[in-house]
Image: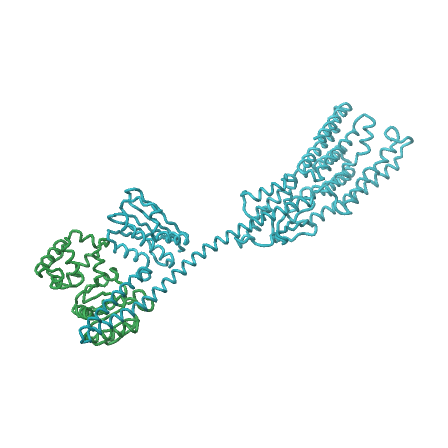
Chain colours: A cyan, B green
C-alpha cells in the first residue's frame, strides 16, 4: 500500500518534471508508463504471495525505470541519477528471468550472471557519464571519447555474454522441468529468451541498417513492457493462485466439498499451497475401491494435481505424509513456487488426518458390506440346512413310518388272535397318524411344491387351501430365483395369509406375484376390516423374523391397513437377473 | 394283471411289490427313476403302473412327467401316482388326460392295505381315484374352482365331492345315510346346475366335474 503510493507519487512527480522539461515530446513519458506496468504487476504479485520475491523484484524494476526516466528531465541532479541507472533495467530483466518463479536465485551460475549484469550496467556505463566532457561529463577535464567508446564496446560484449548465458540457463531449465511446470514457466521463459536477444540484436540491426533511433527505442520499450505482461500471463495460468491458510485446507478436506476422494485432496493441496504442479502420491489404494487409484490418476491428470506414476525430479521438493509413524503418501512440489517448506509440512499433517478419515470411512463401508454379505450367507446356509432336513425327514423318517404302518397292517391281517389283530390295527392307525404329522411338519418346514414347482406355484397352492376366496395374478417367471429369496417370499405370503384368516374377517384375498428383471414383488391384499398396525401384525407372529430376512436380502416389507379398508402387505426383494 | 413299479427307495419298493403281489398283480419290473419307468412300460406293456412323483435325478416331479408320457403312449394303461404330498395342480394334470383309470394318492395310503388294494382294482377298472386331501382342497373356498360350485347346495357339494373322489353311488349313499335314488337325484340336479349332459357313465361324469372345476 505504502509502496504503491510511493511509486505513484514518484511517477506523478516524474511526469510533472518531464512536462516542465518538454511537454511536446512524448518519448520521455513512456518510461514512467513502463514503470507503472511493472509496479502494477509487482504489487499484485506481492499482495497475492507475500513470501515470494518476484513481486519485490518487479517493484524494483518499476523504481529502476523511474530513475532512468529522470534522465530526461532538465534538473541536473536528476539527470545524473538517470544517467547512472540508464542500463540497470536491462540487468534487472535478467535478474527477474533467472529468479522466476520464487524470486530467489538458485545456483552459482545464476548468481554470477546476475551480478555480471549489474556490474556491466553500472560500472561500464560510468565512463559514459563521467568522461563525456563538458557539458555532460560529471568529471572536470576534457572528454575522453576513446575511453567511452572502449567502455561501450566492453559493455556490449559483456552484455552479450551475460544475455546468452542467461538464455542458456533459461533454456536448460525449460528442458529440465516437467510438462506441467513448463506450462507455468514457458510463457515467461520463452518471452525472456526472446527479449534478451531482441534488445541487443535490434540494437545491431538498427545500427547496421541505419534506422531511426526512435524505432530502436520503441522496440526496446515493447520488449521491456513484455516482461510484466508475460508475468501477468503466469499469474493467470496459476503460478500465483490465491493461497488459503492450511487451517482452511483442514476444513475443506473434512467437508463434503465438490469432487471426491484423493483427486480432491490433491487439488485442495495444490490450490492451498499455490503450486499447481504439486503432486500427491498415495502409497496404498483406498480400501473401498480397488480401481480408484487409476481413476484418480486419470482424473487428476487433467487437473495437474496428482499423478502417482510421476517420480519426483531431483529439483523437486518432497514431503512425506506419515500416519502412526508409517509413510502413507508423498507430496512432491516445486520449491521454486513454495519456498516455505513448513507450509508443506503442515499441509502434510492435515492430509494425514484426511487420509485417516478416508481409511476409517472405507473400513466402515467394507465392514457394512461384509455384514450384509454375511447375513445373506447365513440365510442361505439356513435355507440349505432346512432343505437338507426336509430331505432327510422325507427320505428317512417319513418312509420308515409308512413302512412300519404297512407292516402293522399286514400283521393285523395275518394274525388270527382277535386281540392281537386289534392291537396291530391300532398300531397301524397310530403310525398312520404320526406319519401324517411328520408330513405336515415337513410341509411347514419347506413345502414340496416350492422346491418342485417354484415360488409362484407354491403360492397358488397356498391360496387354494384358504377358507376364503383367493385370487392369484402372476406376471413374469419365477425361474432362477435364489433359494433364500424363494423361501423368504413364500413364508411372507404364508404368514400374511395366516393373518388374513385369523384377523381380517375378509371375504377374499388378492395375491399379486410380479417378477421384474432385477427384483421380485409380491403383494397380499384382503378386503377385511383393516386397522392392523405394524406392531400388532409383527407381534406374536412369524412376520417379525421374516422382516429381518427380507431386510438381510436387501428387500423391503411394507404394510397398509386403513380402518375398514383391508390390509395390504407388500414385499419386494432384489435379485440378480 | 401285470404291473410296473417305480420307486427310488428300496424298502418302499419292496413293500409295494409285496402288496401288489398279494393283491393279485404280477410285478413285471421295479425301477428307480422316470426314464427307466418309461422304458419298462414300453417293454412290458403292463396293465397298471404305480409310480412315486419324486424320483432321481431332479427329485421334483419326475414320476408325474413319466406318468403323463405313459398316458399319451399307452392310453389303456392304468396309472397310480403316489406322493409324499398331494397337490391339486398335479391331480388336475392327471385327470385332464381323460382316458383310462387314474389314481393320485398320498404315499402313506399304501399302508392301509385293504383300502389300497381296493383302490388299485378300481383304477384298473378305469375309475378315477383321488386322495381325500385333494378332494378336500378342491372343495375349499380358496380354490378358484370353487366359484363355479357356489350355486350348489351344501348337500349337492357334498355329493359332488364324493363323486370327485371316485366313489360309487352306493358308496355315497352309505356315506351320507341316504338312499341311492336320492344320490341319483342330487347328481342329476348337480348336472343341471353345472350344465352337464346327464347320460354319461360314473367316472366320466367325475372327470367332467373335475375338468369343470379346473376351469
**From the image, which quarter does the N terminus of chain A lie in?**
top right
Tally of numbered tags: 0
The answer to whether any part of residue B34 appears in the image is: no
- Residue A88 versus residue B18 in the image, above or below: above
The answer to whether any part of residue A338 appears in the image is: yes
Residue A274 drawn at (x, y percent) = 64, 42
Q: Judge by depth and name the residue closer to the eye, A17 or A302.
A: A302
Q: Judge by depth and name the residue closer to the eye, A192 or A394.
A: A394
The quadrant holding residue B65 is bottom left
The quadrant holding residue A52 is top right
Left or right position of A208 against B177: right
Left or right position of A558 against A157: left
Left or right position of A5 against A440: right
Residue appearing at x 81%, y 28% in the figure: A78
Residue A113 drawn at (x, y percent) = 78, 44
Left or right position of B43 against A230: left
- Residue A498 versus residue A39 in the image, above or below: below
Residue A499 drawn at (x, y percent) = 30, 50
Residue appearing at x 19%, y 72% in the figure: A419
Residue that sits furthest to the right in the current view: A141
- Residue B157 versus residue B103 in the image, above or below: above
**From the image, which quarter does the C terminus of chain A lie in?**
bottom left
Q: Judge by depth and name the residue closer to the eye, B99 or B186.
A: B186
Q: Judge by depth and name the residue closer to the eye, A490 or A188.
A: A490
- Residue A69 versus residue A327 in the image, above or below: above
Amino acid at each position: 500500500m505504502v509502496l504503491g503510493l510511493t511509486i505513484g507519487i514518484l511517477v506523478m512527480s516524474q511526469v510533472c518534471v518531464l512536462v516542465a522539461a518538454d511537454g511536446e515530446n512524448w518519448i520521455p513519458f513512456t518510461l514512467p508508463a513502463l514503470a507503472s506496468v511493472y509496479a502494477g504487476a509487482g504489487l499484485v504479485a506481492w499482495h497475492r504471495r507475500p513470501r515470494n520475491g518476484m513481486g519485490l523484484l518487479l517493484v524494483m524494476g518499476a523504481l529502476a525505470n523511474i530513475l532512468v526516466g529522470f534522465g530526461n528531465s532538465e534538473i541536473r541532479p536528476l539527470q545524473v541519477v538517470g544517467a547512472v541507472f540508464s542500463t540497470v533495467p536491462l540487468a534487472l530483466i535478467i535478474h527477474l528471468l533467472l529468479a522466476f518463479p520464487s524470486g530467489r536465485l538458485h545456483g552459482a551460475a545464476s548468481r554470477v550472471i546476475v551480478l555480471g549484469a549489474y556490474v556491466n550496467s553500472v560500472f561500464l556505463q560510468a565512463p559514459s557519464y563521467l568522461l563525456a566532457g563538458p557539458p555532460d561529463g560529471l568529471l572536470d577535464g576534457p572528454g575522453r571519447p576513446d575511453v567511452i567508446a572502449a567502455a561501450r564496446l566492453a559493455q556490449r560484449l559483456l552484455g552479450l555474454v551475460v544475455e546468452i548465458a542467461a538464455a542458456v540457463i533459461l533454456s536448460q531449465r525449460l528442458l529440465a522441468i516437467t510438462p506441467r511446470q513448463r506450462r507455468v514457466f514457458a510463457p515467461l521463459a520463452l518471452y525472456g529468451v526472446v527479449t534478451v536477444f531482441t534488445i541487443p540484436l535490434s540494437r545491431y540491426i538498427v545500427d547496421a541498417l541505419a534506422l531511426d533511433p526512435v524505432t530502436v527505442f520503441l522496440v526496446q520499450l515493447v520488449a521491456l513492457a513484455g516482461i510484466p505482461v508475460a508475468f501477468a500471463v503466469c499469474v493467470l495460468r496459476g503460478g500465483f493462485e490465491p493461497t488459503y491458510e492450511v487451517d482452511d485446507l483442514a476444513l475443506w478436506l473434512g467437508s463434503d466439498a465438490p469432487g471426491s476422494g484423493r483427486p480432491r485432496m490433491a487439488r485442495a493441496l495444490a490450490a492451498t499451497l499455490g503450486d499447481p504442479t504439486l503432486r500427491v502420491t498415495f502409497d496404498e489404494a483406498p480400501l473401498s475401491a480397488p480401481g480408484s487409484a487409476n481413476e484418480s490418476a486419470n482424473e487428476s491428470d487433467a487437473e495437474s494435481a496428482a499423478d502417482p506414476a510421476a517420480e519426483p525430479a531431483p529439483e523437486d521438493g518432497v514431503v512425506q505424509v506419515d500416519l502412526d509413524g508409517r509413510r502413507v503418501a508423498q507430496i512432491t512440489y516445486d520449491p521454486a513456487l513454495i519456498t516455505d517448506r513448513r507450509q508443506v509440512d503442515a499441509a502434510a499433517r492435515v492430509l494425514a488426518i484426511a487420509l485417516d478419515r478416508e481409511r476409517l470411512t472405507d473400513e466402515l463401508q467394507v465392514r457394512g458390506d461384509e455384514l450384509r454379505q454375511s447375513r445373506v450367507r447365513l440365510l442361505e446356509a439356513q435355507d440349505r440346512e432346512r432343505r437338507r432336513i426336509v430331505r432327510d425327514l422325507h427320505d428317512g423318517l417319513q418312509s420308515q413310518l409308512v413302512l412300519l404302518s404297512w407292516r402293522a397292517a399286514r400283521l393285523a391281517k395275518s394274525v388270527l388272535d382277535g386281540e392281537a389283530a386289534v392291537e396291530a390295527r391300532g398300531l397301524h392307525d397310530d403310525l398312520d397318524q404320526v406319519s401324517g404329522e411328520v408330513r405336515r411338519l415337513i410341509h411347514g418346514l419347506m413345502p414340496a411344491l416350492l422346491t418342485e414347482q417354484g415360488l409362484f406355484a407354491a403360492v397358488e397352492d397356498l391360496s387354494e387351501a384358504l377358507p376364503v376366496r383367493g385370487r392369484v395374478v402372476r406376471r413374469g417367471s419365477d425361474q432362477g430365483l435364489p433359494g433364500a429369496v424363494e423361501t423368504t417370499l413364500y413364508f411372507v405370503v404364508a404368514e400374511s395369509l395366516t393373518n388374513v384368516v385369523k384377523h381380517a374377517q375378509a371375504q377374499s384375498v388378492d395375491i399379486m406375484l410380479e417378477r421384474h428383471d432385477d427384483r421380485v414383488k409380491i403383494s397380499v391384499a384382503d378386503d377385511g376390516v383393516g386397522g392392523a398396525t405394524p406392531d400388532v401384525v409383527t407381534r406374536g407372529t412369524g412376520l417379525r423374523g421374516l422382516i429381518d430376512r427380507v431386510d438381510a436380502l436387501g428387500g423391503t416389507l411394507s404394510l397398509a391397513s386403513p380402518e375398514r379398508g383391508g390390509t395390504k402387505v407388500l414385499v419386494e426383494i432384489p435379485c440378480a437377473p | 394283471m401285470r404291473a410296473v413299479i417305480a420307486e427310488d427307495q428300496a424298502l418302499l419298493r419292496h413293500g409295494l411289490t409285496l402288496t401288489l403281489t398279494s393283491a393279485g398283480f404280477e410285478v413285471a419290473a421295479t425301477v428307480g427313476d422316470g426314464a427307466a419307468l418309461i422304458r419298462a412300460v414300453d417293454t412290458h406293456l403292463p396293465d397298471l403302473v404305480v409310480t412315486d412323483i419324486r424320483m432321481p435325478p431332479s427329485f421334483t416331479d419326475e414320476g408325474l412327467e413319466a406318468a403323463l408320457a405313459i398316458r399319451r403312449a399307452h392310453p389303456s394303461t392304468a396309472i397310480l401316482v403316489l406322493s409324499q404330498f398331494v397337490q391339486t395342480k398335479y391331480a388336475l394334470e392327471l385327470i385332464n388326460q381323460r382316458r383310462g383309470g387314474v389314481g393320485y394318492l398320498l404315499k402313506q395310503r399304501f399302508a392301509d392295505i385293504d383300502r389300497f388294494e381296493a383302490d388299485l382294482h378300481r383304477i384298473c377298472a378305469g375309475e378315477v381315484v383321488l386322495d381325500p386331501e385333494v378332494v378336500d382342497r378342491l372343495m375349499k373356498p380358496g380354490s378358484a374352482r370353487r366359484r363355479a360350485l357356489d350355486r350348489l347346495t351344501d348337500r349337492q357339494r357334498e355329493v359332488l365331492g364324493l363323486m370327485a373322489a371316485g366313489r360309487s353311488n352306493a358308496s355315497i349313499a352309505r356315506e351320507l345315510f341316504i338312499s341311492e335314488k336320492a344320490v341319483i337325484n342330487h347328481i342329476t340336479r348337480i348336472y343341471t346346475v353345472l350344465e352337464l349332459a346327464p347320460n354319461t357313465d360314473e367316472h366320466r361324469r367325475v372327470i367332467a366335474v373335475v375338468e369343470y372345476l379346473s376351469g
